[in-house]
Amino acid sequence: MIGGGPAGLSFARSLADTELEILVVERSSLDQLAEPAQDGREIALTHRSTEILKNLGVWSRIPPDEISPIRKAEVLDGDSSYSLSFDRSSLTVDALGYLISNHLIRKALCEEVETAANIELLTGVTVTNLSTNPSGAAVVLSNGETVEASLVVAADSRFSDARRKMGIPASMHDFSRVAVVCRMKHDLPHDGTAFECFHYERTLAVLPMSGQRSSIVITAPTHAAAEIMGMSEQTFNIDVQQRFRNRFGQMILEGKRYAYPLVAVYADRFVATRFALVGDAAVGMHPVTAHGFNLGLRGQATLASEIKTALTLGKDIAGASVLNNYQSKHQRVTRPLYLATNAIVGLFTNDAPPIKLVRKLVLRLGNSFPPVKRMVTQGLAETDTQWSLFRSLLPRPH
């Protein structure tokens, strides 16, 4: 396993109840994995992802007061007061999803992986060479060691070096935008509502956290990022408060601001001979639909279930049929979401007058057709009944 991020660690943990020996190679130190620094990113988890984390034993390691339910979502466009609303009324669950800090998920995953007897974490090293053939794979590490394996799985970011070494091309879409993320305290309660405000020039997402706090995500053109990051705290507070139309009263920055360039990535293939991509190395999403992290969890679970089925049947875990099944299933889920997300970004960041009219029309049509709205809500929450079949293949906490 190349990469000790959430997708890599969750994949390793998914196979902890098998006889396989798993080596996770990660460039960060063990201390950085065990106690990851806060990075400003808050993850909106669907019910499918929540179930995966529960079955991996990870959910119970996250403090309950750090899990914030999202009960409602509002989408606003430009200077209009009209909004497209999604809530849990059409669902049989108590929330659309749950917001958890990225560093807490990473910490919980590391803690869980460290309890598994068949998983070894090799930290502070990188992969310098990688080769595979029909009979096996060899990974050369920066410490001089060469590791032989039946299967190599890479989850080493959307700019995956392992993907490049294996000669797998990827389509990249640079949005020429930067996401500035932070936390803010505010005077008025959020009532578990998430807001996505498609203002002209900038997008503002306000996501509910525990207490009267919210995660703030400002998406702006790259040239404007330095200005946002360089604002004094007072100026920044007033700017966000006014752009959010004082809905939460006074808003105050809590901690640091972090900036992340926005680039979407889709690998041309997810597999090669005795090799597979998971997480952002396979699909790196724009964050506007909050599907990226969830697709990473789903992809690793899909691959793990195919491998476990192969073990049960006595088949080669890296055989072409196993890897192709994974690729087919994951592409079928991810490609439509990837294309739809990029289309949404293109529509709601285009400020040309004709497009502004289309944006407003889209919101009104969304509210006017309950079946479509219900389908979108179920897609956001990932509560479809097909999940019960998939769930049976997941590992249980040990």
Image: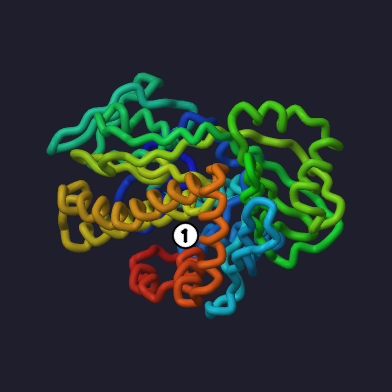
Is residue 131 found left or right of 339 in the rendered image? left
Which residue is pictured at 39% across the width and 44% down the height? 283
Q: Nearer the viewer, residue 321 or 222?
A: 222
Residue 352 sits above or below residue 378 on the image: above
Residue 170 lies, in percent from the top left, at: 32, 35
Q: Nearer the viewer, residue 357 or 326?
A: 357
Specify whether residue 167 is in view.
yes
Q: Nearer the viewer, residue 131 or 343?
A: 343
Residue 388 sits above or below residue 203 on the image: below
Outermost residue, front side: 354
Is residue 159 found left or right of 365 in the rendered image? left
Q: Nearer the viewer, residue 113 or 180?
A: 180
Residue 315 lies, in percent from the top left, at: 15, 55
Which residue is pictured at 62% across the width and 26% down the height? 223
Is residue 4 found left or right of 135 in the rendered image? right
Q: Quadrant of residue 120?
A: top left
Which residue is pictured at 64% across the width and 63% down the height? 83
Task: Indicate the amino acid at tag 1.
Answer: Leu
Report which residue position mark 1 lands on. 56
